[in-house]
Image (cartoon, grey):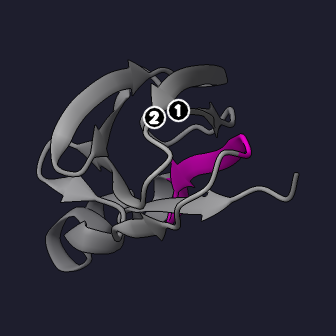
Amino acid sequence: MRILRIKRPSQMADILRPYGIMLNGAPMGLIKRNARLELDVPSNPFVVQATIDWCSSLPLDVPAGDAPLTLRVSNTYGIWKANWAIKHAADTYLTLDLVAP
């Protein structure tokens, strides 16, 4: 097992709404604005994705290993382009990226 930490910064977009975290397509938890979520995950390779309603991040492939990982999830487009992104870029509405250890 390894530890997966997910951080969500304070942004105006989606201010009152949590993001869902999926691991290999299964829901693992919710993360609110300016919060952290810590999960025990398998050491083998897996895919993690963030979701909100019908929008999501691109899937992120995580290789096998035992070292703890920290990811950051955020709104890609910000508050001013959020409505456009919901209609035209739903699969990249959120960004999920690796934070350097």
Q: Furthest-bottom residue in view?
A: 88
Please indicate whether residue 55 sits to the left or right of residue 54 in the image. right
Q: Disc 2 residue type? A: Val
The reply to whether residue 21 is visible in this rendering is yes
Q: Disc 1 residue type? A: Met
Marks 2/1 in contact by CB < 8 Å: the verdict is yes
Please indicate whether residue 20 sits to the left or right of residue 36 in the image. left
Callout 1: helix, strand or loop?
Answer: loop
- Cα distance in 3D space between marks 2 and 1: 6 Å
Q: Quick one: 77 or 47, which is closer to the camera? A: 47
Does residue 73 show up magenta in the picture? yes
Residue 83 coordinates in the image, percent (x, y): 28, 60
Residue 86 coordinates in the image, percent (x, y): 22, 62
- Residue segment shown in magenta: 67-78
The residue under label 2 is 41
Q: Residues within 10 Å of mark 1 (few under 14, many from 20)?
A: few
Name the residue located 22 percent from the left edge and 68 percent from the top edge: 90
The residue under label 1 is 1
Callout 2: helix, strand or loop?
Answer: strand
Q: Relative to 80, is 32 above or below?
A: above
Residue 58 coordinates in the image, percent (x, y): 35, 71
The reply to whether residue 17 is visible in this rendering is no
Name the residue located 55 percent from the left edge and 50 percent from the top edge: 74
